[in-house]
Image (tube, coloured by chain):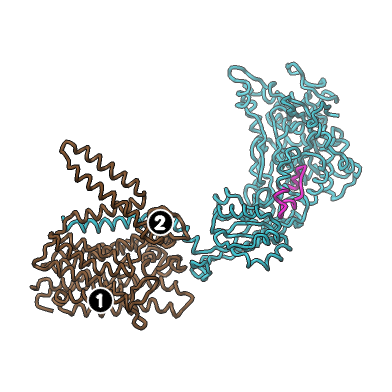
Chain colours: A brown, B cyan
Amino acid sequence: MGKSATGFDWITILIYLLLVGFGWANIYSASLAEDHSDFFEFSQIYSKQALWIILSFLLVIILLSIEAKFYQRFSSVIYAISLLSLAGLFIFGSTIAGQTAWYQIGPVSIQPAEFAKAATALAVAKYLSGIQTNIKDFTHQLRVFLIVGLPMLLVLLQPDAGSAMIYFSFAFALYREGLHFAYLLLGFFAAILFVATLAFGPLWVIGGVLIILILTYLKNLKRRPNLIKYLFFAAVAVGFSLSVNYVFQNVFKQHHRDRFNIVLGREVDSRGIGYNTNQSEIAIGSGGLFGKGWTEGTQTKGHFVPEQHTDYIFSTVGEEWGFLGSTFIIGLFVLLMLRLIYLAERQRSTFNRVYGYGVIGIIFMHFLVNIGMVIGIFPTVGIPLPFLSYGGSGLWGFTILLFIFVKLDSERMSFN
Amino acid sequence: MRKLLLYIIILTTGIVFLARLFYLQIMDESFTVRSQDNAIEIVYDYPQRGYISDRNGKLMVSNQPSYDVMAIPRNLKPFDTTEFCKILSIEPEELGRRLDKAKIYSPILPSVIIPQLTKAEYAYLQEKMRKYEGFYIQKRSLRDYQVDHSANVLGYIAQVNQQKINEDPYYISGDLIGRSGVEKVYEDLLRGKKGVKYIQKDRFNRNIGPYKDGIYDTLPTKGKDITITIDAQLQAYGEKLMENKRGGIVAIEPESGEILSLITAPNYDPSLLVGRKRSPNYTRLYYDSIARPLYDRGLLAEYPPGSPFKTLTALIGLQEGVVDTDDTFSCNNGYNYGARRPLGCHSHPSPLDMVPGIAHSCNSYFAQVYRKTIEKFPTPQEGINTWNKHLKSFGLGQFMGNDLSTGRPGKIPDAEYYNQIYDYPTYEWYATATISNAIGQGEVLMTPIQLANMTAIIANRGWYYTPHILKKIEGDPIKEEKFTKKNKTTIDPKHFEPVVEGMHQVYKKGTASSLQIPGIEIAGKTGTAENFTEIDGKRTQLTDHSIFIAFAPVDDPKIAIAVFVENGYWGSRYAGRIASLMVEKYLKKEITRTDMEDWILNHSLKEEYAKPLSGEPFRINQ
């Protein structure tokens, strides 16, 4: 550590420890129930995670010992290795549940996608911190999109649409660095059209969009509005809506369609495709204000919620720790993200700031999609809850992501 | 702005999540229920229902095991319907209907599909049960009646209805509950408390051990055995005497208020309402709108009391000081009080003072006593209300507060009632307008149990315990204040002696002189009440009701009885004979006057009851 080191941000580290510790307690409870009948297996899940946690503490020490400059200097190399490891999956990877996402090394399976997020964040930060780079320049925009898009495409091909979706979170970092607000607005508008098309069908959406456009046009008639612009916008909206409908009906697999249908309230079926969400809501809802107590959750014990120790870990929190416990976890995440924004904003170097926003975006996207799914306001998308969900690759991925930033922040006063 | 956007998005997300969690965890209670529904199975262990014995310790009701085929709709798997229906002799369509109904009640709670299997059906089915996933057999205890009488007293148990399930969380679908009689009133004592086991289930509905190590589990508590005040022998005898007649008998032990007999006729065998034949049998009894076997006449029928009421007229007259026992009143085959038609009477010596007045049941005598009572006061309103107050102290015109499952208040009119029907103050009304009350006709209505209680009060010379049916719980006498506290009437005890003597004379030389019991001094009063029905919208008079009250022995009363026989003509004809036989049976345990017994057993009133239904003109009082 150089002279300019200003110490590590203990607030961030404390929140990290709380999340990991609380996560392990819930994994213990969830896995206790899961393999009730098989003692051998049961001892492995939570002790395995304990091992991962201890190892990630070692990892933290290593990450914090490495000089901050290293991350910036070698970001391209790290990114390249990461891309290779993703591409290598198609040759050496093993397929579990239809996804070719893991390298099987002895008893350990490693999921390179979990590490690629940090690598991409480094690469984006590196590119945007370049002196010639101007995010308002269209060519440069395309290059950034390429940096983000490459690992995204490789992950999408596994296929893991959930993890691929996370890469959209770099929009926050790009926006912070000056990307036009229209990109975000366009994305937001597209998302609304997307959901509305699925919920109400393309005819209603197109009709609605056209009526709004006509009304706006008539209202602005005195100001001589540009008819061409309106027509163009209408054509794009209609085209988008129709293609969404086409993709939904012809490209999506049935289980994707089902998941959307459940969240959009089109299906009610407690034993069928809505099972996960339904059981998860029952578990959380039955927790009440104070919860049923640690390892006392009846839904958790009966293992009614599938994947409860991984993607659905938050339902254990909800059932056993109640509204207070859920609020605690959500509070910790919000606090962590706000703290990270504060840290990112106090960075002197663009590299540090962009990387920080990358971290925030990635954590936020997981938080949004995972908890949204578990409490039934988001479609079922299989991504983990950072720091809490079971899984070594995930925990290490997020630990690396976060602690590189903690290290960068601690040396923010040094010149580079 | 660029810095702010992410702040806003993060905070908004946090708030939306907390709002959703608040809804899930705090607002919407249904998730807790659904959680218990799918993670915890509740298994019930039904206790033995308490036994019921009569006052002499004779067992009247015990239990027999019964087996219900239950189903949990969610756990059902496709099964061999044909075989299943054949074993249980049920139509497949009917089975489908019941399963649908069970599903509507709850897909995860058990419902009774086929109730009360026979032992043979149970034995055969038990071996095959594992083939029918989702079905199981629930053992319960059903009633086993040791007597073929007292159905109206004991009542019956049946599956609890949905309304009760909603009201009382103790009950779940398929539970048995007392629906009438003692079974209903003392349900809480008799049922005991079912035991509960909470079993933790996993998502495959496998049993993974007791919930919270069984800390919420309870063992069943056996129901309490109770002794009722009924004398089973007397009850059986009374029911036999009432065969082919309609009416009610209530017998009370005056010194305790215990109900010795509570008879309604026609009656039915309590065993009819047990087992799988229960439903058709009940339907048959329920829809018999002519004989109405489920209608407890002893408690519900409000009849004009007729002449027995004259004893009260005498008592009130004495208490108000308007008459002395020696005062005589003349009777010229009736009493002309100024109306178009005098109040008629039969022939007897005249003039009479009180004791022979009661013995000969002189209408004229009591009409004049009644009139003097009412006219003692400046207005008839005050007079009637004083009269009403005295009668209320006999428990008349109101619910008695007894421990029977049903009852009626009867009717004792007051000033307000007459003001209304005579449109006071536009029109005045006077004591004479209500003169029929003097002889228990007019607006007065009483149930047989009120009549019996009135008799007990006279026997006690002025006080009573509220009549009751429960004697002991698990061998301990009841201590409830309501039944162990004396109720005093507003009549001075000294005024009862001349009335008792008058009633004694009824047997000695009056209207019941033919009904004396050798060796027992008995006091009584006959009654003959006019009554009417509507045939084709026309008010038609029917043969008079035969009424009798009695208590014995006169000096140490052990039994007070009221008998009411519909359309039995005059008081001593049916009711008097039956009362006399009942008293003899209770006090002597044997019948010496077998010719009288034979007369009652062989006389039927069925022809009399058929008359108004025949559609043809008929004559009454033959």
Stretch of the chain drawn in magenta = B256-281
Q: Is residue A319 above or below residue A6?
A: above
The subunit carrying tag 2 is A
Residue A368: give x, y in percent of width and height. 30, 61
Dot 2: element = helix
Q: In front of the other: label 1 or label 2?
A: 1
In the image: residue B84, left or right of residue A142:
right
Location of residue A324 (image quadrant): bottom left
**Residue type, numbered disc 2:** Ile
**Residue type, numbered disc 1:** Leu
A355 vs A267, nearest the viewer: A267
Residue A91: give x, y in percent of width and height. 32, 77
In the image: residue A129, left or right of residue B11:
left
Say which residue appears at 78% left-offset and 52% top-offset.
B148
Q: Residue furthest bottom?
A: A106
* Residue B171 visible, this angle: no
Q: Which residue is mark 1?
A: A84
Q: Is residue B200 above or below residue B583?
A: below
Residue B226: give x, y in percent of width and height. 69, 56
Q: Quadrant of the N terminus of chain A?
A: bottom left
Q: Which residue is mark 2?
A: A262
Among numbered discs 1 and 2, the one appearing first in the sequence? 1
B415 is within the stretch colored magenta: no
In the image: residue A182, left or right of residue A280:
left
Say which residue appears at 16% left-offset and 60% top-offset.
A176
Mark-to-mark CA distance, 1 and 2: 37 Å
Q: Is residue A20 above or below residue B466?
A: below
Dot 1: element = helix
B266 is within the stretch colored magenta: yes
